[in-house]
Image (tube, rainbow, N blue to C red):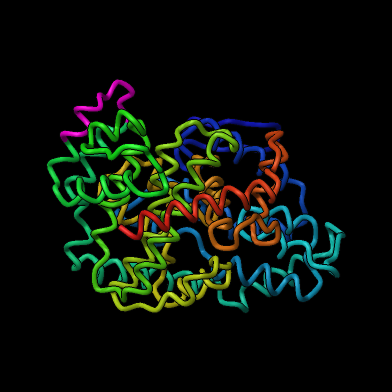
Amino acid sequence: AIFHAIPKGMAFYPKDGRDVHTLVSTAVDRLKISEAPKGIRIIYEKIRPQKATDIKSEEDKRFISSPFYQFYAFLARKLASSGTLSEGVKRLLYEYVPYGMLNKEGADDEAGSLNPEEVDKYINNWGYEERYEAKIEQGKKTLRRFRNIEHLFTLPSISRQIMNVSDDPLLSASKMAKIIEKDPVLTSKILKVVNSAFYGFPRKIESVEHAVVILGNEEVVNLAFSIAVSRMIHDVSLAKAQALWEHSLQVAFLSHWLAPRIGHERKDLVYTVGLLHDLGKIVFLQGGDNMGNLDNMSTIDDLAEEEGKTGLSHAEMGAYLAERWNLPEAIVDGIHAHHMPMLSSRVPIAITVHLADCIAHIGYIDMDMVNAGVIRFVKEQGLQFISNEVIEEVYLDIKSKVKFILEV
């Protein structure tokens, strides 16, 4: 097997990753852990095999084997409350939990404070192996249950056509218009949106081609894809459907705005991931599952609760559906990792959507709610967090735009 080695850290292809970035990152992680106390290594070996970038050994396994939210929540909560959250354990948990959870007062800063035997016993008493096997079996049952909802597993034809041409930088306005105009209802809704007070054009726009010329391909493609995908929401209460779709649109537009600031230039791709990031919630709601309070950003405990009931969270369910739609791997991965962005094989995309999700819920970036690894990534890349004053202004503009779209 091909491997990358950094002194005492090794990473093997394809078991540990399928690209150089992931392999080197894994090798560095292992270098950091190689001389750590045994207690920390025990925890590391429980966490590391569940990375989302691991190769798929059988159908669907990537979506039910990783992440293991119940274990992450247990570690963060129990070790923190017992005062044994050493710096070594903090480093291991950085990829999995919010920043605020790792920086509680009273945590022990002694890297060697964990007794290896006690840690091993602590984890075994929690029932790691039994709980993990139960999660896998429950996940398999859940996926079997939802495979019977036929309309979920067929991406609307018009959506696929729009996505297929959206990557073409030479796409003409007339060609884009011809695709959209195949769907009279979609055409009508787009014209209503572009003629709304939000855009404020002095003259009425009479055709999709005219809209493309005025607004540009990217803006019209995003609108068209958003409206087309919204049709797949069935059997969900009007209030929940509207809340979910409003949030999804906000995250899509915020992701589009944030992308270049996080170091990702494919704004159209990030927009799609943002739009579909909570696809799994739509699936669960259509299956009669309770998704809790949709107004709040999912915490590590919320994700652990979802996983405890179904074997996987809405993030894995959404990624599973996206893969069944044959969407690009970058979109599948972005949906899968939007709550655990440091586990993504495309970290900037996942981070962008993660931050956009936070902003859409509360109107600004709350560091205590953001995944701890995101803060470390931003610092290591030399990026600057945007001031919350700027974010709040952009958020209000996007909120207004989404309101107009929903009204039509």
Q: Tell me which segment is drawn in magenta.
A: 167-178
Q: Is residue 347 above or below residue 134?
A: above
Q: Position of residue 111 (x, y in %)?
A: 83, 57
Q: Position of residue 132 (x, y in %)?
A: 48, 69
Q: Residue furthest top?
A: 170
Residue 280 located left or right of residue 104: left
As for residue 173 lying within the magenta part, the answer is yes
Q: Position of residue 367 (x, y in %)?
A: 70, 56
Residue 191 located left or right of residue 68: left
Residue ID at (66%, 38%):
28
Q: Nearer the viewer, residue 149 or 234?
A: 234
Task: State how many labels appear.
Answer: 0
As for residue 81 lying within the magenta part, the answer is no
Q: Is residue 401 above or below residue 212?
A: below
Residue 49 located left or right of residue 288: right
User: Quick one: quadrant of the C terminus?
Assistant: bottom left
Q: Nearer the viewer, residue 126 or 109?
A: 109
Q: Nearer the viewer, residue 253 or 210?
A: 210
Residue ID at (20%, 49%):
188
Residue ID at (57%, 38%):
11
Q: Is residue 329 above or below residue 291?
A: above
Residue 211 located left or right of residue 262: left
Q: Position of residue 280 (x, y in %)?
A: 37, 63
Q: Is residue 119 above or below residue 346?
A: below
Residue ID at (62%, 31%):
5
Q: Nearer the viewer, residue 198 or 251?
A: 198
The image quarter in which residue 137 lies: bottom left
